[in-house]
Image: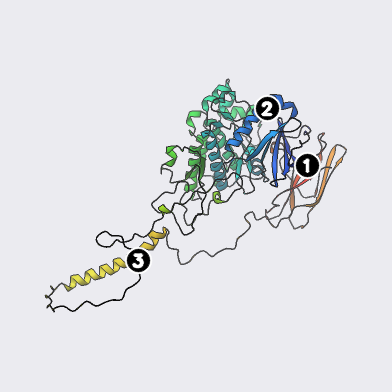
Amino acid sequence: MNQRRPAAPPPQLPGFTPLELLGSGGFADVYLYEQELPRRRVAVKVLLPERISASAAQFTAEANVMAMLSTHPAIVTIYQAGVSSDGRPYLVMEYCPRPNLQVRYRREPFSVAEALRVGIQVAAAVETAHRAGVQHRDIKPANILVTEYNRPALTDFGIATTSQDASEMTGVSIPWSPPEAFAGDAAAELAQSGARVDVYQLGATTYTLLAGRSPFEIPGQRNGSAELIERIARMPLPAMERPDVPTSLHVVLSRAMAKAPADRYPSAVAFARALQKVQIELAHSVTPIDILDDQPDPEDLKDDDGGLTRVRGITDIAPIETATRPSATTKQVGTPTPTASEPVDDATVLRPAGGFASSQIDDATVLRPPATPPAGGASAPAWAPPTAHTPAAPGPQVAPEPAPRRWGAIIAATVIGVALLGIGAATIPQLISGVEPEPENTTPVVAPQDPTGNSAVPQVTETQGTIQGENAVFTWKNPEPEAGDFFLWSRRMLPEDSKPVRTEEPTVTLPTGGEAQVCIEVTLVRADGTFTREPARICTD
C-alpha cells in the first residue's frame, strides 16, 4: 500500500465509528474504526469504488478464505464482511497495533531465537491453510502483522488460491517469490509447484528477518526488479554475515529456497520441524506447531517428532485440576515436554477471539502409586480405621526347632534389604511427580518485570501538524527529556514506502505529495534502547 493517491472517504457503517486512515493501496483502503458493541478497535479494509467491478469476486474470495482460517492463532481474525451503503465491499478484521514484521526488520534484524519462533508459528498457519485447500502465494514480512500479545498474524489472502484454481494466480512480490514465478508460463509452473511456492516464501521471509534485507538484495549494488529476478533464478542463497546464525539454519533455509521445487521441503510443517531441530541444537525453548485439522494426518500423531506438533481438533473446555500432572510414560498430544531450563511457551497465553483452547490433561494419564491388593485378589479399601489388637488365646507350648547357623547370610540379607528400601523410598516420590529433585542452590526468585521494558518511556506530547504551502510541518514535545534521547518518525503509509528516520529535533517537514492530509508516527527512543510502547500519530488538520 502507499499514499500516492488521495484515499477515498471512509464509508458509514452501522455500529462503527471511523477514527483514522491506516493505509492505502491499489485495490483498497484500510481504516481504523471503533466498534460500538462490543467496544473495541478494528481494522476495516474497504475496496476502492473504481475496483469494485474488477475485484469484487477476488475480495469476496479473500473474505471467505480468512473466515475459514482466522481461528488459527497466527492468522488475522476476521469479524464480519459486508457491503456499505454506497456499494463498497468491506472486511472488518482484528486490529494489530504493533509494527508489522517489515517495519521491525528494517529497524534491526531479528535475533535467531525470535526468527525461529516466528518462522515456526507462521509455517503452522500456512500448513493449516494448505490442509484446507488454500495456498497463500504472497508470504512476506509486510503481510505478517503482530497482535497485542506479540504473536505474528498472517494476513492479506487477496491473491490466495485453492488447489483447484491455482493456475489462475496472478501478482507476486518479487523479492520473496520463487524462480518459477518468472518462468515463461509462470501460472502453469506455479500451479505445478503447489504448496512448495509457500515453502519457498516461508524460507525467504525467515531469511529476511535474520539478514535485515530480502535474500537476494546486495547492499551497494543495483537491486531493481531485473537484477533481483536474475539472482533469484541463478544465484545461490548468500550466506549471512552473522556469527550467531548456525550453519544448520542456513542449510534449512537453502533447502526451503531451492531453485527446483522438488528439492524443497514437501510441506510447510516439514519446514517448521526443520526449524524446531535448529532450536533443539541451540538449546532454545522449542516452539510448538499449531495445526488445525478435524482429521489429522496419521504422520502427525506419531512420536517421531517428540510431541512437538499440536494437531488441534474440536476440544471441549473444562477445568483442569492443578494437582494433576501428565504421565512420564503417556504422551500428551499437542504439548512438548518442557525441561527445567525452558520457559513456558507463549502459546499458553490466552488470546481473545480466535485462539485455540488448551488441550485437557486426561486424569487417566496421571501416574499414581499402585495399590497393593490383599491376598486372594480381593480389592482392599484405600484406608480403614485402626482396630484394637486382641491377643490370641494361648495354645499349647511347642518347643522351637533349632535354627540353622546362618547368621552371616541373614545379616548380609538384612543390610541389603534396608539399602533397597532406602533407595525405593527416595525414588518412588520422583516417579510419581515425574520431575527431578531441585538442587539445594536454587535460582533466586526475581520480581515480575515488564516484558517489553518500555513502560517508563512516555509518548511525545503537544503534537501538531499543519500544511504550509506544499509541505507538511509536524512538531511535538518530549515530556520527560533525558540525555541521549532521539526520535524515530515515519510517514503513515505502508512500510514498503516509509522507512523510519532518526531525528534529534522535535520537528519534521516533508512534502505533502498533493495529499489533503498527511500523517506520521513518532517514537521516543532512550539512549539505552528502550522506546515508547506505541508510537504517537500526528496528522495535519
Report the amino acid beneath label 2. Ala
Mark identifier at residue 519? 1
- Dot 3 crowding, Cα within 10 Å, few <14, some 14–19, many 20+: few
Q: Amino acid at mark 1?
A: Cys
Marks 2/1: CA distance?
A: 29 Å
Could you tell whether 189 is left or right of 460 in the image?
left
Asked which secondary structure carries label 2, the reply is: helix
In what quadrant of the picture does the C terminus appear?
Answer: top right
> Coloring scheme of the render?
rainbow
Q: Amino acid at mark 3?
A: Ala
Question: At 74% from the left edge and 57% from the top edge, which residue is drawn?
Answer: 483
From the image, tell me which residue sits under label 3. Answer: 425
Q: CA distance from mark 3 to mark 1?
A: 70 Å
Q: Is residue 185 visible?
A: yes
Which quadrant of the figure has residue 439? bottom left
Q: Earlier in the sequence, mark 2 or mark 1?
A: 2
Closest to the camera, between mark 3 and mark 1, is: 3
Mark-to-mark CA distance, 3 and 2: 72 Å
Of badges 3 and 2, nearer the viewer stands 2
Residue 225 image offset from top left, x and y in percent: 65, 28
> Which residue position is annotated with label 2?
56
Percent x, y of residue 95 = 67, 43
Q: Residue at x 79, y 33 (%)?
A: 6
Residue 372 in the image: state x and y as whole percent.
Answer: 30, 61
Quadrant where the N terminus lies? top right
For the residues bearing labels 2 and 1, Cβ distance under 8 angstroms: no
Q: Nearer the viewer, mark 2 or mark 1?
A: 2
Please tell me which of labels 3 and 1 falls first in the chain.
3
